[in-house]
Amino acid sequence: MMLQVTDMGVRLGGRQVLSDISFAIRQGEVVGLLGPNGAGKSTLIKALAGIIEPTEGHLTPPCAQEASTQSGGGIAYLPQDGIGKTGLSVVEAILLGRHDRLGLRITDADLDAAHAALARFSIADLADRRIDTLSGGQRQLVGLAQVLFRQPRIMLLDEPTSALDLYRQLLVLDNVRELAAERNITVICVLHDLSLAARFAERIVFLKDGRLIADDASSRVMTSEMLGRIYNIEAEILTGREGHMHVAAIRALPQILKDAAE
């Protein structure tokens, strides 16, 4: 196993945000982390990244150990708001992804790798632009390119498509899935679009109210019954002409049905 979470709990500001979270993720696996607002998805992914320290349970290997890897590998984390606004150029921001091991000298190989990461997400033309002149979606793509440039073993992506149009959502998620297969990278990705998650992730982890509700192959957990339980909606699962699942939300369920289900 690449990553093992055992009985993890997190308290923030005196409030229990996550409780009894346990799962194991294999190397090269692509996992979608789903759930309603306030379910604890961002908290969990920050705990996996070593940004938040769990108050119960443990994680194997320790994320701080993974994140400190100097010669490639380790964990690369992309927050919801992507890369922050800065006066650096895009290519300079990409190079900062390896600041811990580049030293004072930037080689031609490093520059080539930075430009290749930009090209992977179709933003090579932005290389000389200042970060603070880009749109939110462009900064999100730059953040993804920086994550790729780091050559991680584990990619933790918190809503990486939230600011992107439909074309770029597909471009990003298809690219990330291909990278996982090509380089044997483990990917954990927070998503809100259920159809994209069903298409992109081979496995889904559902959270609700800080607890793990389901963890299985996408085809087994992406059901009308499960979506009713997790999101309190009536939904229909459709299959497209290429075999991809699509989630059609029909209506919000009355509160009385939600209470009965719980």
Image (cartoon, helix red, strand yellow):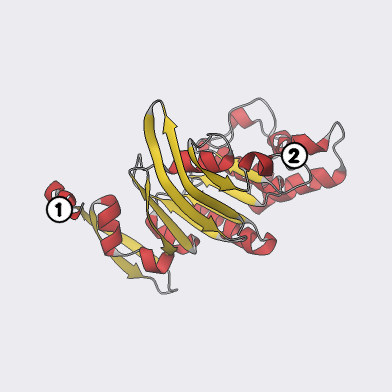
In this rendering, the answer to whether 202 lies above or below 67 is below
Quadrant (top left, top right, bottom left, bottom right) of the N terminus: bottom right
| Residue under the image location 64 percent in, 59 percent down | 179
- Residue 138 placement, left or right of 13: right
Q: Of marks 1 and 2, which one's residue comes earlier in the chain?
A: 2
Question: Can you tell which mark lies on residue 199?
Answer: none
Q: Secondary structure at mark 1?
A: helix
Count every numbered label the image shows and give the total: 2
Residue 86 rendering spot, x and y as whole percentages: 63, 26
| Residue under the image location 86 percent in, 31 percent down | 104
Residue 56 rendering spot, x and y as whole percentages: 47, 39
Residue 6 rendering spot, x and y as whole percentages: 50, 50
Q: Splitting the image into 4 quarters, where does residue 150 fall? A: top right
Residue 166 appears in view: no
Residue hosting label 2: 98
Residue hosting label 1: 260
| Residue under the image location 47 percent in, 62 percent down | 203
Residue type marked 2: Arg
Q: CA distance from mark 1 to mark 2?
A: 52 Å
| Residue under the image location 68 percent in, 36 percent down | 90
In this rendering, the answer to whether 199 lies above or below 189 is below
Foreground residue, 59 or 165?
A: 59
Q: Residues within 10 Å of mark 1 (few under 14, many from 20)?
A: few
Q: Marks 2 and 1: in contact by CB < 8 Å?
A: no
Residue 141 rendering spot, x and y as whole percentages: 58, 44
Given the current orientation, which residue lies at the most extreme left position? 256
